[in-house]
Amino acid sequence: MTPVSQLDDIQPSDWAFQALYSLNDRYGINKTNPNGGFRGNRALTRYEFANALQTTIEQINELVAQGNTPAISRDDIAILERLREEFAAELTKLQGRVDTLEVRTSELQANQFSTTTKLTGQVIFGVTGGSFSGDRIVDVTGREITTKQPNPTFVYRAALDFNTSFSGSDLLKIRLDAGSDGADDNAAGFLEPSLGSVLDFAAKPPVEQLGISRLFYTFSPLKNVILSLGPKIVLSDYIDTNRYANLSFLDFSTQAFVNNYLLFPVQGLGAGAVISWNPGDGPFTARAGYIAAAANEPTSRDSTSFVPGIFPIGYTLYPNGGSTGGFFGDPHQGIAEVEYAPSKNFAVRLQYAFGNILGGQFNVFGANFELALSDRFGVFGRYGHASYKDTSFGDISPTYWMLGLAFPDLFVRGAKAGIAVGQPFISRDVGNATQTNFEAFYNYPISNNIQIAPVIQVITNPGNQESNGTVLTGTLRTVFSF
């Protein structure tokens, strides 16, 4: 008979196999731990057998200590001792691996960043360029922007998120953000800066300086109620979301397609709060929010000062306006939304926003829908109607719309493609034509952490000016996530 010590694999016919199986059966090891014990139904490698042996010894010791089994017999003790001797080398290596794992676990615990905080990050690169037909480009007021074709640019955004939870169900978020020159570092934003043509991911971070772009605390004070509040929040993070057009680093990059362009006159960061209520985890969700863009400024700013957080057309509508500052001062915005989502394939959202910017009042009604016709095809759209009082053009009532098609998992799982068309600011009082934006993109996942997307934008009658030629831009967007 070949000694067990010379066997590479332990077969069911070997004495060691049968001996261990009998021990497991006598002491009910398989019944005590049916998934982790020695099951005795296949050949095992020596290391697998040694692991099963160690488990059996530990289980028998535990049963004896708990008084759940009579004292182990001398014969069984002799069998265990012989098995230990035969597999001494493997048991020693297993123990060594356990000791090494414990040491590494202790090192990780001693050197981890935080017991409550996780660090995530994102970097966006965008190589972009574009051109326009005609002799020159003017803005919505007729002011000349340029007569020369823009040069290609390389834009970027970098963000670090510190996500902290104290209870497991709450979140304290701190985001450090930096970017390139903002709205005009890309051809679309340079040639049409007022009506939402800018690349959204380029416009949103602080300009060239590392700064805090999110600072808020989210928790649930009541069942089905979620409250977020803080000195640095953005309303569009919570309201007017859409599964196909909402994240400019993942799908559409044109700002007027990422959100309803009229719905957020206070576009930037501010102090405030957002509350969400989903009664009974049902299909209806109600949300409400408030934000003040100059909440940290106790004094007013005159018309010659830059007021943060205003969407670009606001400065055209109120060129002589200023800010009163303060948490309840100008600029501020309140917003409410009701969402009906009876299934994961359909959702519709209705919104109402009001507030003050640069001394003027506004009211906006919005609508947003998404419909998945299949796992790989969906349609979506937004609509808005607003009123602005006492602008430089008088009392105006612009409208907005956009429609798009989405193609999830196109060609490759995890990819996404889309095409959209929209008119961000339809008004007979501002300009002599209506700007129309088009965008098509294909987001391809190179890996779980790297995605690359070609993006094409076409803008007709940019700036609502008939004299402007068509703008065509292209961007190669690359996103690194970690």
Image (tube, rainbow, N blue to C red):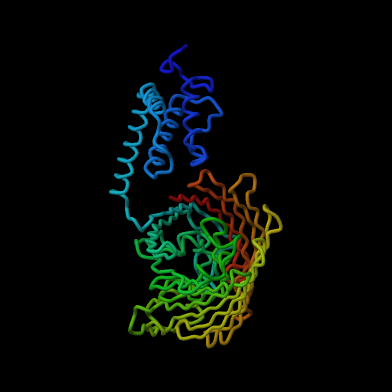
Numbered-mark total:
0
- Residue 307, given in percent of the width and then of the height, sits at 40, 77
- Residue 5, given in percent of the width and then of the height, sits at 41, 17
Task: Name the outermost residue toward the top.
Answer: 1
In the image, residue 152 above or below residue 70? below
Task: Name the outermost residue toward the right.
Answer: 373
Nearest the viewer among 155 and 227 is: 227
Nearest the viewer among 33 and 240 is: 33
Going by the image, does 190 lie left or right of 403? left
Locate residue 51: give its quadrant.
top left
In the image, residue 432 above or below residue 341? below
Q: Residue at x 39, y 82 (%)?
A: 327
- Residue 76, given in percent of the width and then of the height, sits at 41, 28
Nearest the viewer among 216 and 415 is: 216
Going by the image, does 398 lie left or right of 237? right
In the image, residue 29 above or below residue 433? above
- Residue 323, given in percent of the width and then of the height, sits at 40, 83
Say if residue 211 shows up in the picture: yes
Say if residue 381 shows up in the picture: no
Q: Residue at x 40, y 33 (%)?
A: 72
